C-alpha cells in the first residue's frame, strides 16, 4: 500500500484528495475515506490535497498511526464500501474537526 488515510479523516470526509487522485482508489463510509492498497499507484497527489493532513505514505506513517494501514486494507477490500470518484460535501462536523486539529 502506498498511501494510507488516518484518523484525522474521521468525522471530516473532505474529498479534495479524491479530486487530486488520477485513479479511483478511494472508498468511503459514513465517517471517513480509505485507500485501496492494490489500486493506489503511489503518485502522492492525494497527500498535499488533504486539508486535515490525514494521508501519509505508508513509509512515513507516524508510529501511533500504523494501525491505519490494516484498517484501510480491510475496509477498502470488504466489499461493503463504494468507490468515491467525485467531490462531495464534507461532513457537518468537518470544520470543527479541522479547527480542533489546529489546521
Image (cartoon, rainbow, N blue to C red):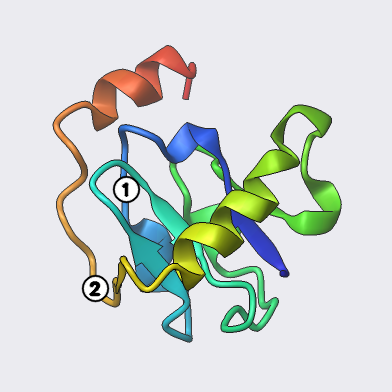
Q: Position of residue 56 (x, y in %)?
A: 68, 51
Q: Residues within 10 Å of mark 1 (few under 14, many from 20)?
A: many
Q: Quadrant of the N terminus?
A: bottom right
Residue at coordinates 23% horizontally, 65% vertically from top-left? 87
**Which numbered disc, 2 or 1, marks the residue that appears first in the sequence?**
1
Foreground of the two, 51 or 61: 61
Residue at coordinates 77% horizontally, 56% vertically from top-left? 58
Q: Quadrant of residue 18?
A: bottom left
- Would residue 48 be found to the left or right of residue 89 on screen? right
Which numbered dot is residue 30? none
Q: Quadrant of residue 90?
A: top left
Q: How many marks?
A: 2
Vertical placement of residue 40 versus 49, above or below? below
Q: Which residue is mark 1?
A: 14
Tell me the SS state at disc 2: loop
Q: Residues within 10 Å of mark 2 (few under 14, many from 20)?
A: some
Vertical placement of residue 27 versus 85, above or below? above
Tell me the SS state at disc 1: loop
Q: Position of residue 98 (x, y in %)?
A: 38, 25
Q: Position of residue 82 (x, y in %)?
A: 28, 72
Q: Position of residue 41 (x, y in %)?
A: 65, 83
Foreground of the two, 96 or 78: 78
CB-based contact (under 8 Å), mark 2 and mark 1 = no
Residue at coordinates 31% horizontally, 66% vertically from top-left? 81
Q: Which residue is mark 2?
A: 86
Q: CA distance from mark 2 to mark 1?
A: 11 Å
Residue at coordinates 40% horizontally, 54% vertically from top-left? 33
Q: Quadrant of residue 88?
A: bottom left
Amino acid at each position: 500500500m502506498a498511501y494510507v488515510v488516518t484518523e484525522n479523516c474521521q468525522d471530516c470526509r473532505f474529498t479534495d484528495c479524491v479530486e487530486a487522485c488520477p485513479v479511483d482508489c478511494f472508498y468511503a463510509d459514513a465517517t471517513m475515506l480509505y485507500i485501496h492498497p492494490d489500486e493506489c499507484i503511489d503518485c502522492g497527489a492525494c497527500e498535499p490535497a488533504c486539508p486535515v493532513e490525514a494521508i501519509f505514505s505508508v513509509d512515513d506513517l507516524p508510529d501511533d498511526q500504523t494501525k491505519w494501514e490494516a484498517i484501510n486494507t480491510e475496509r477498502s477490500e470488504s466489499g461493503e464500501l463504494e468507490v468515491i470518484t467525485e467531490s462531495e460535501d464534507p461532513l457537518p462536523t468537518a470544520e470543527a474537526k479541522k479547527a480542533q486539529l489546529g489546521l
